[in-house]
């Protein structure tokens, strides 16, 4: 059982996975049973990995993974949940900056109350979504509406909906947090038609993937409706690379961060995320029951 | 029993206090038993209020109240607690904006984790301080250190200290929230000597009164220590008027808002605060037991 990792493995990983190597050369790849890597790295490794049985990503999102190169029967496991606390905090930081007008020097800005308002979490069943719901409920007594395919922590939600109902219920939310993965189903789901249904003074925050929102459409909405505010940590890719330049930065009712909510910004977060990936591989090997098995049909 | 109010009273106040008038002329003041007003208005009304037995302020802070004009035996009641939820939310908005670098476009900023860190609340026993502690504990599992004379909700604090111990313990805090009223004791308490003891990467936020921090000293600290971040909703008075201009705005490790955390920014917050003041006057009249009796010796 040979496991190859493109990231240096912390000691806890080495204890769990004594057969894992974080230093290896090209000749080792055809013998590998399990690959641990970032999605874009799979383009290089997958064609050479003739014995591979499973792939574990370090990232939570796998929309960059080259699923077309994946041999039949090879499972991919994402690292969903590994960044939940950090990204959920980040989502609330975006919400609160927009709600309270932090950094605005003139007194024309009217802060917006948070306690008790309606919080809608898109992708509310996942790791990040559940933690966003928890902070909303425990910290600010919010009424929490979840929109998701499944719910890891259903007790945190006052209402649970399927994403097919979004059009009919999006107008109920004071605050909308997008934690969606980018799949065929979610690509561009927040388009002009959907966005224009939001409540007066709505705050929309994206910590999922840029492309779940249509950039032109949210720009148009923010120009037309000064009451709506939008914040994002994730941006739209140009030639496959996330581009933090956006004309949204010109707008007064926008704020953002250049994808620093997860591992990028913090070594502790990154190390913990790698350990989570190792635990999942350990469970896969010992019990065959790993978490976050990717539904490949959502992407291909 | 004649009650005069300088603010228009909501219906709930009129039910509680049928003898209260929010429209009156100068001749009514000498007959008033109770005055409801903002602290600075007392300068005009107190000298004429020959029958006054008690004064209820609409504001939580009474540092602007002209205590030297107060006849002996007249009690002053503040409206402490009436803005707690709104101001505590605002404190967290300042913390989170600074912790996560919201609005910074370049990727050099490293976000700072919030969950599980040490939160120190100065004035932690009061209404705002208790609500800050609650959000920290419930929302972000923080270890909460209270520094206060008394504690309304002691169960929210992992440690409780008197303000005389501040010098010895301030270095334990990752986040410091100043909710202090401005009194003889707290004036300039966060001076250079005190501020220079803060932990690496500390975030300091002031939602109490500007003058509890020494403006020059915090400016010096932020220049010397780029790791420390400071946010404030309250500014320093010049000629008795809070002046939102400050050279702190030039600094990258500073952010603020022009005292919009309380009633200024939100009509609902203001109306609810007036109702709180009316309830307190009602309790004073019916049972003699009103809350937030001001210790005049703290100010004179």
Image (cartoon, coloured by chain):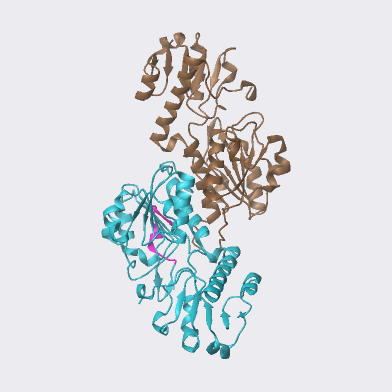
Chain colours: A brown, B cyan
Does B211 sit above or below residue A124? Answer: below
Q: Is residue B80 visible?
A: yes
Tell me where residue B60 appears, x and y as whole percent: 47, 68
Tell me where residue B57 appears, x and y as whole percent: 50, 74
Q: Is residue B105 visible?
A: no
**In this figure, what is the number of numbered marks?**
0
Does B130 sit above or below residue B35? Answer: above
Tell me where residue B269 appears, x and y as whole percent: 57, 63
Report the span colored magenta: B244-256
Q: For residue B46: magenta? A: no
Q: For residue B249: magenta? A: yes
User: Which residue is at the far right?
Assistant: A168
- Please state, as top left, top right, bottom left or bottom right, where the C terminus of chain A lies in the image: top right
Tell me where residue A174 appears, x and y as whole percent: 63, 50
- Please state, as top left, top right, bottom left or bottom right, where the N terminus of chain A lies in the image: top left
User: Which residue is at the far bottom?
Assistant: B27
For residue A265, what is the image quadrant? top left
For this rendering, which residue is in front, B196 or B263?
B263
For this rendering, which residue is in front, A47 or B198?
B198
For this rendering, which residue is in front, B243 or A44?
B243
Left or right: residue A297 compared with residue B160: right
Residue placed at 36% from the left, 20% from the top? Answer: A15
């Amino acid at each position: 059982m040979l496991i190859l990792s493109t990231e240096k493995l912390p000691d806890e990983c080495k204890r769990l996975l004594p057969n894992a190597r974080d230093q290896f050369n090209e000749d080792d790849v055809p013998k590998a049973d399990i690959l641990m890597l970032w999605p874009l790295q799979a383009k290089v490794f997958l064609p050479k990995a003739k014995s591979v049985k499973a792939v574990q990503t370090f990232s939570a999102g796998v929309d960059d993974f080259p699923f077309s190169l994946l041999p039949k029967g090879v499972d991919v496991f994402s690292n969903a949940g590994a960044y939940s606390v950090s990204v959920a905090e980040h989502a609330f930081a975006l919400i609160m900056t927009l709600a309270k007008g932090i950094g605005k020097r003139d007194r024309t800005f009217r802060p917006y109350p948070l306690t008790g308002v309606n919080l809608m979490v898109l992708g509310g069943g996942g790791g990040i979504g559940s933690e966003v719901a928890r902070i909303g409920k425990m910290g600010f007594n919010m009424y929490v509406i979840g929109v998701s395919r499944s719910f890891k922590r259903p007790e945190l939600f006052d209402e649970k909906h399927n994403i097919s109902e979004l059009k009919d219920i999006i107008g109920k939310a004071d605050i909308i947090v997008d934690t969606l993965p980018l799949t065929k189903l979610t690509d561009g789901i927040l388009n002009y038609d959907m966005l224009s249904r939001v409540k007066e003074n709505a705050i929309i925050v994206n910590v999922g993937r840029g492309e779940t929102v249509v950039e032109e459409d949210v720009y148009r909405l923010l120009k037309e409706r000064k009451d709506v505010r939008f914040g994002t940590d994730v941006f739209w890719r140009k030639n496959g690379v996330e581009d933090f330049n956006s004309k949204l930065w010109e707008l007064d009712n926008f704020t953002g961060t250049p994808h620093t909510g997860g591992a990028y910004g913090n070594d502790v977060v990154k190390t913990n995320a790698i350990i989570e990936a190792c635990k999942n591989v350990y469970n896969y090997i010992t019990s065959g029951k790993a978490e976050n098995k990717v539904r490949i049909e959502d992407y291909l």
